[in-house]
Amino acid sequence: MSGYAAASRRAPDRFAITVPESWFTLDLRSGMAMRSIDPLVHARLRGAPMLAGRRAVMAAMLRDAARRATASGAVYCGVMVDAVDGAGLSATVSVSSFRHDVWPGEPVPTAGDLVLGLQEEPEPSTSGTWRKVQIVDLPAVGLAARMLGVLASGGGLDIEPSLVASMRTLIPVPGAPRVAQVECRSPNVAVTNALHSLFDAVTATFRFVPSGPDFRAPV
């Protein structure tokens, strides 16, 4: 995914992240994500008639992922829609950013600042949720705060929340009081460990791009 946005000259205003080639990628900045979904699915299924029956399901999953990512303020969303041994397997990765003001005299947040705002739940609760907080060292951007685990999602007055495997990584934007957030989620909690390894590999590709016309995703 790539793109651009206005930002301070002292700080990068672009990012890049890489997902596996089999994933769908949605650029949420343009407001055209929903219109792009049907052509994306059509292109993916071209030459694969055995998957034609999954067209509506795949399109619905992409629309749901786009709606959720847009509602969270994300500018990019990558979506995995796959099947393993006949069972559906899906996941999303989204990238967003937010302002983070730190202590007086500290112009930009650090991974240490960010990890203080994350709450750990080391032992699984009766509902099956757990959260682990850590500082990780990403290849291209250095230290970042991370929370991974199994979280409750959705629910309501008469609806039980569902469980999702989750990994959220908070990355300080160099030279700016901002944080880039890379969030990965999947409903397939039976393979949480494998998903966390996949999420870690995808997040490890995140990098800031200070200049260049080939990138168009703002941080």
Image (spheres, rainbow, N blue to C red):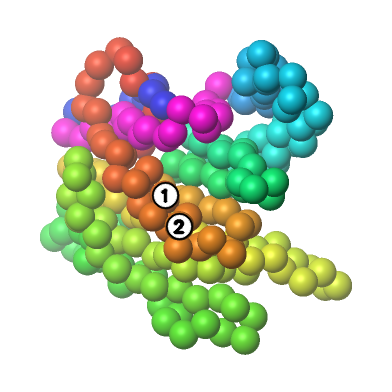
Instruction: Answer with the quarter of the image where residue 120 lies.
Output: bottom left
Q: Are marks 1 and 2 in contact (CB under 8 Å)?
A: yes
Seen at 25% across and 34% down, the residue is 208
Query: Would you place residue 109 above or below residue 156 in this image?
Result: above
The reply to whether residue 90 is in sight is: yes
Residue 145, given in percent of the width and then of the height, sits at: 30, 61
Q: Which residue is label 1 attached to? A: 198
**Pointer 1 local density, CA inside 10 Å: few below 14, some 14–19, many at least 20:** some
Horizontal side of 10 relative to 177 (left or right) equals left
The reply to whether residue 108 is in sight is: no
Residue 49, given in percent of the width and then of the height, sits at: 74, 19
Q: Which residue is label 2 attached to? A: 194
Q: Specify the segment rendered in magenta.
A: 10-30
The reply to whether the magenta stretch includes residue 5 is no
Quarter of the figure that contains the N terminus: top left
- Type of amino acid under label 1: Leu
Quarter of the figure that contains the C terminus: top left
Seen at 71% across and 34% down, the residue is 58
Circle 2 — which element?
A: helix
Tally of numbered tags: 2
